[in-house]
């Protein structure tokens, strides 16, 4: 039976396909033989499990193979036969039950590209706006590309930091007559451990940023990339310099 195409709307179609019984039987025989090799059923010798039992046990696998190996190719062949290019992927309304010796009717819906006539636009006049590109604009774009594509390398030891340099700063703060890193500054001397009612040891949660010392809040503000105070403080220094950060 040839495929039947119905109009749902100007752009929606319904396609009905009848898959011959012999194609269904061949598919069932193929997948049954494959399941016999891979499946062991309690109470049956290897390769002797009934077809209906195996098909029911692996119904999801059977439907997936039916869709991929039989239904989808039939839909594609029918669309080619009808010279139709769908705009959307065809959607199956249902997957019918597989019955030995009986054909299978498949119904799918999809949308097509609308047909329309392009009006005459030869009389329309367009004005192309002028595009002005100055030397300054070109130089600015070249500088932006240079900066983005630049390879960052270590500066010479006696290099003086200037505007545009990328620097790494190690923040040290005073604690107990010495300078320590921010992590050491905020770390308790010993971990606090307590026993709960179940006798399990738990470490209390680390304080949130807003509960830390005022000093760390100030430094966190200065380390923002938009901070002019921090940017100005590193100018004219050289790598390895140690100095007080103004805040």
Image (spheres, rainbow, N blue to C red):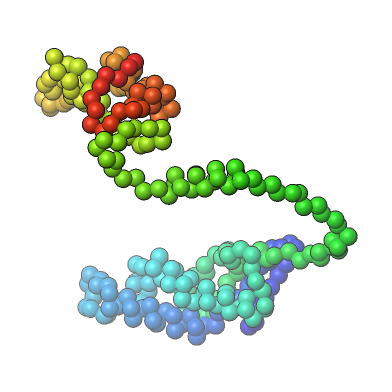
Where residue 67 sits in the image (x, y, percent)?
48, 71
64 over 221 or under it: above or below: below
Q: Residue at coordinates 12% horizontally, 27% vertically from top-left? A: 200
In the image, taking residue 56 as reference, residue 242 lies left or right, namely left
**Circle count:** 0
The residue sitting at the front extreme is: 158
Q: Quadrant of the N terminus?
A: bottom right
104 over 59 or under it: above or below: below
Viewer-nearest residue: 33 or 223: 223
The residue sitting at the right extreme is: 123
Where residue 195 sits in the image (x, y, percent)?
12, 21
The residue sitting at the bottom extreme is: 22
61 over 202 or under it: above or below: below
Viewer can see residue 186: no
Q: Residue at coordinates 43% horizontally, 72% vertically from top-left? A: 65
Viewer-nearest residue: 159 or 21: 159
Viewer-nearest residue: 158 or 36: 158
In the image, taking residue 33 as reference, residue 17 lies left or right, namely right
Q: Residue at coordinates 27% horizontally, 19% vertically from top-left? A: 244
Viewer-nearest residue: 230 or 237: 237
Q: Quadrant of the C terminus?
A: top left
Where residue 196 sits in the image (x, y, percent)?
15, 21
Q: Residue at coordinates 27% horizontally, 73% vertically from top-left? A: 39
Where residue 84 sits in the image (x, y, percent)?
67, 74
Q: Can you tell which quarter of the image residue 203 is in?
A: top left
Viewer can see residue 119: yes
């Amino acid at each position: 039976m040839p495929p039947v195409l119905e109009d749902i709307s100007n752009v929606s179609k319904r396609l009905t396909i009848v898959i011959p019984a012999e194609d269904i039987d061949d598919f069932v025989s193929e997948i049954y033989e494959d399941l016999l090799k891979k499946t062991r059923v309690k109470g049956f010798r290897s390769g002797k499990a009934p077809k209906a039992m195996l098909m029911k046990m692996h119904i999801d696998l059977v439907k997936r193979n039916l869709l991929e190996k039989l239904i989808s190719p039939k839909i594609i062949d029918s669309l080619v036969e009808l010279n139709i290019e769908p705009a959307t992927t065809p959607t199956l309304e249902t997957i019918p039950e597989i019955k030995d010796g009986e054909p299978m009717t498949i119904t799918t819906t999809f949308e097509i590209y609308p047909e329309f006539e392009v009006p005459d636009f030869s009389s329309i006049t367009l004005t192309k706006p002028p595009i002005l590109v100055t030397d300054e604009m070109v130089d600015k774009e070249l500088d932006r590309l240079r900066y983005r594509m630049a390879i960052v390398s270590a500066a010479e030891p006696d290099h003086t930091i200037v505007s545009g340099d990328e620097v790494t700063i190690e923040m040290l703060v005073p604690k107990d007559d010495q300078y320590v890193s921010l992590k050491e500054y905020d770390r308790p001397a010993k971990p606090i451990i307590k026993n709960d009612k179940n006798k399990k040891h738990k470490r209390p949660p680390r304080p949130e940023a807003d509960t830390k010392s005022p000093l760390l809040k100030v430094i966190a503000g200065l380390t923002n990339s938009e901070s002019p105070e921090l940017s100005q403080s590193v100018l004219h220094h050289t790598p390895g310099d140690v100095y007080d950060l103004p805040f």
